[in-house]
Amino acid sequence: MIDGIIIIVYLIIILLVGVFASRNLKTIDDFAISNVKYGKGVIFITMCCSFLGGGFSFGNATEVFKNGIGNIIALFGFSLGQIFLGKYIASKIEDYEGCISTGEVLGKVYGKKIRIITGGLSSVICAGILGAQVSVMGTIFETFMGIPSTLGISIGFGIILIYSTMGGIKADVITDVIQFWVLMIGLPILFIYGINSVGGIKNIITTVPSEYFNPINGKSIAYLISMFFTLMLGEMLVPPYVQRLLMGKSAKETGKATVMSGYASMIFFIITGTIGLIAYTIEPTMEANLAMTGLIKLVLPVGLSGIIISAMMSIVLSTADSFLNSAAVGIVNDIYIPIKGDNIPEKMRLRIVRITNLIIGILSILIAILIPNLIGILRFAYSFWAPTILPALLITLLNKKLNRIALWSGILSGFIVTIYWTLILNDPYGINGLVVGFLVNVIISLILNIGNKIRYIRF
């Protein structure tokens, strides 16, 4: 009862704060990147909140519970990707002042067609990652409050839909700050209680099967390396992260915030992965996907559980609102507006992006139902981004413009190779098709780009 009250109060606070932030929202630019430029601290918080979602927390605990620390090592690929972006890419974003989306960034260099394609693929990956958060939301409500999963999704996700639709990115950022600090209090408490409940780290090491501490653990080195790069590339420069690069006060501060988020993610992955090991130590017969939620029920007293459950909800809410916003912006700013023309009134643009926000939210629920596995949802979403748009985006932000043949050949070849490698060959040697598709895209793009320059020089 007490836990339920704490959770309800927390959700009401998030809703009210989010709705309050919707004041003075007048344009689609306000909806996408806000009319306020944010400093390093806020960018760091909202960047962390964008990626610390259900897949990287609940999913990590589940995978470690089933197979050991290999998943933590693989997730470090994401962390290194963030550090790379902060050091070498974030400073280039100043060249795209005035853009509000990934599609618009590429469209500024390559034109309307690539902007539209990027908008479509942006919405796919955002909806997929959003679907993963929806799935976790249902699990939380069902596990802790005895509410059926579908009803829990309706309640929790309904709150996100309201404040995200009304307040756009500004509501997302303000609620992110609250959710971040709730998480920073709640997650360490769960970790410490869990460690104490099993008698310390030493008991975990002696109880958990020794092979769990082998990163390979029955798989191949190629598989581990593949997963490392899958997680590095899968969410690299996805729309919410690009939006956060665009809304910083300066590229220097934004770069530092991105690097900080990469290091912070390593700590987060170690903690959530260790929670999976703690759950295994306490109850090895527990259902794996309940590793984190089950640990809360096993080790925490009433009252404190409510705070920790709120922290778990923060993980889901903070990521969901970011990807929901980016999906809507991608469809409206990068598909609808380029097709219809720039003469659409600002009020109409804002109204359309809000309606789109609602529709995307509803569709994400269907994705969660069709693909119940968290990691499966993420891998499905990643396949539409890294092998297609990411190479061109990276090359462009590094101040290397591709010619038209190189751009489109790279995108098409990356997509075809990924589909063929994954669906026809079934990921031979344990190597993810996403990684192969990305490499093929990069190689073909650079070869055709260099070849075209050589022909031009000879001519």
Image (cartoon, rainbow, N blue to C red):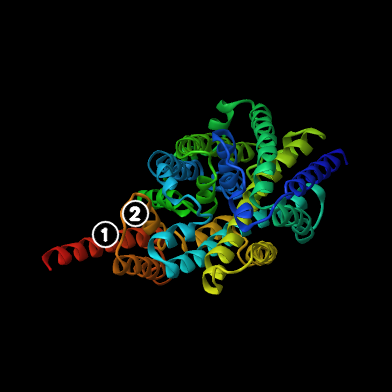
The disc at residue 383 is none
Q: Is residue 211 visible?
A: yes
Residue sitting nearer the eye, 134 or 190: 134
Q: Residue, x 53% and y 60% (percent of image)?
A: 125
Q: Is residue 210 left or right of residue 132?
A: left
Label placed on residue 446: 1
Callout 2 touching callout 1 (CB < 8 Å): yes
Vertically, is 291 above or below 372? above
- Which image quarter is the C terminus in? bottom left
Q: Position of residue 248 (x, y in %)?
A: 53, 41
Would residue 286 be visible to someone looking at this image? no
* Image quarter of the N terminus: top right
Q: Is residue 303 left or right of residue 266?
A: right
Of helix, strand and loop, which one carries label 2?
helix
Amino acid marked by disc 1: Leu
Q: Position of residue 107 (x, y in %)?
A: 44, 62
Q: Residue furthest left?
A: 458
Q: Label 2 neighbourhood size at 10 Å, few (<14), some (14-19), many (20+)?
A: some
Image coordinates of residue 10 in percent, x first then y, are 79, 41
Marks 2/1: CA–CA distance: 9 Å
Q: Residues within 10 Å of mark 1 (few under 14, many from 20)?
A: many
Residue 395 shows which numbered tag? 2
Name the residue located 75 percent from the left edge and 34 percent from the top edge: 300
Name the kind of residue labelled 2 in the image. Answer: Ile
Which residue is rendered at x = 45% and y = 42% of the image? 82
Using the image as rendered, state which of residue 346 and residue 378 is in the foreground: 346
Q: Quadrant of residue 446?
A: bottom left
For mark 1, give the secondary structure: helix
Q: Earlier in the sequence, mark 2 or mark 1?
A: 2
* Residue at point 46%, 60% (across, down): 385
